[in-house]
Image (spheres, helix red, strand yellow):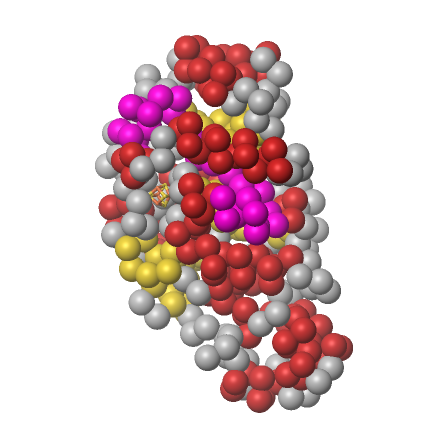
Amino acid sequence: MDSLGALPFAALAGRLGSHTRALAVRKWLFGRGPLAHDGRIPGVRGSERLLAEAPLPPHELAARQVAPDGTTKLALAFPGATVEAVMIPGRGRSTVCLSSQAGCTRSCTFCATARLGFARNLSAAEIVLQYARAAREAAPDAPARNVVFMGMGEPLDNLDAVLAAEAVLMEPPFPRLSPAHVTVSTSGVVPGMKRYLREGRGRLALSLNATSDALRRELMPHTRTWPIAALLDTVRAAQAEDASKSVFVEYVLWDGVNDSDAEADALIALLDGIAAHVNLIPHNPVDGLPFAPPPLARVRAFQKRLADSGRRTIVRWPRGVGIAAACGQLAGQGANSERLLSVSRSEERPA
Ligand code: SF4
């Protein structure tokens, strides 16, 4: 059955026989009012039939937590899948972090989601609905105009749904997010990277986290299949075809694991010739995981080394820390993924 959340605007207008009514439905879906309805959308003629033929995905708000800095985490329960969506407030523009899967089939050792197992892929409509719910948490003067696919799951393992969801979110006339403000983060799945770099309209973020295959295999065992050279060659090839395909490289910093000057230099060398903005993410401790962030001075030294080489680099500092430990409890399945925690660190401070 079709779902309202994933219907392209033209299909919506076709079903309602009116662009004006289709726009009213989009404004209801992505507006600030309640999403609950009694079988019709207020003021939209024909919405009873629309909702009957293409309903919103069934869901419940299972939990909601607000950190002192305003970061708001929602646990949304879909049939057979409870996932988290996070609203991170910003100055003038907020960010919503979306899950693409309930659980994950990958096995990153620093990520608690990996221990949850895998429930199922989310549909495009379920992904869009996460945005619709979380965006309502943003302040009116800082609407949620940034989207990052950094929640639970490996987005490139559910790429059809992710592409369909981002298409709806970017589609005019509304909500029309800028492709520059949509980021899809991957642990490094080469076939999916190739496809997203070809078909995706947002920006790819490669979660690299190590400069040697040996360490990367320890941290992210699934990467046996795709060594670092294959990941970076995929980006190089895409940028050779289209120079506008700039990417983010995410590098979580762990004390004594991957934070030395030598590793900073190795990262500089690996990224030579690649248009990439580096996001350094000091680890945010998660109960039960044996990792710690480096001291502040080490983070600064690592960043300075990259910056001195001419590489654009920022450090993403913690946001929403007061509720981070409870992420998994919200989802009802244990602690949350490192990447979801890391996106809460959206405050950027210069070196
Ligand atoms: S970091 Fe991402 S890809 Fe790795 S296990 Fe966690 S959710 Fe999956």
For residue 126, above or below residue 326: below
Q: Is residue 40 visible?
A: no
Examine the image and state in which quarter residue 187 appears: top left
User: Is 210 contained in the magenta span?
Assistant: yes
Q: Is residue 129 visible?
A: yes
Q: Position of residue 253 (x, y in %)?
A: 41, 25
User: Is 214 contained in the magenta span?
Assistant: yes
Which residue appears at 58% of the width and 43% of the height? 203
For residue 351, above or below residue 238: above
Which residue appears at 49% of the width and 16% of the height? 269
Q: Nearer the viewer, residue 101 or 79?
A: 101
Q: Position of residue 117 (x, y in %)?
A: 25, 52
Provide the residue span drawn in magenta.
194-220
Specify the quadrant that holds the C terminus: top right
Q: Position of residue 314 (x, y in %)?
A: 57, 26
Q: Nearer the viewer, residue 250 or 24?
A: 250
Q: Quadrant of ligand 1?
A: top left
For residue 8, above or below residue 237: below
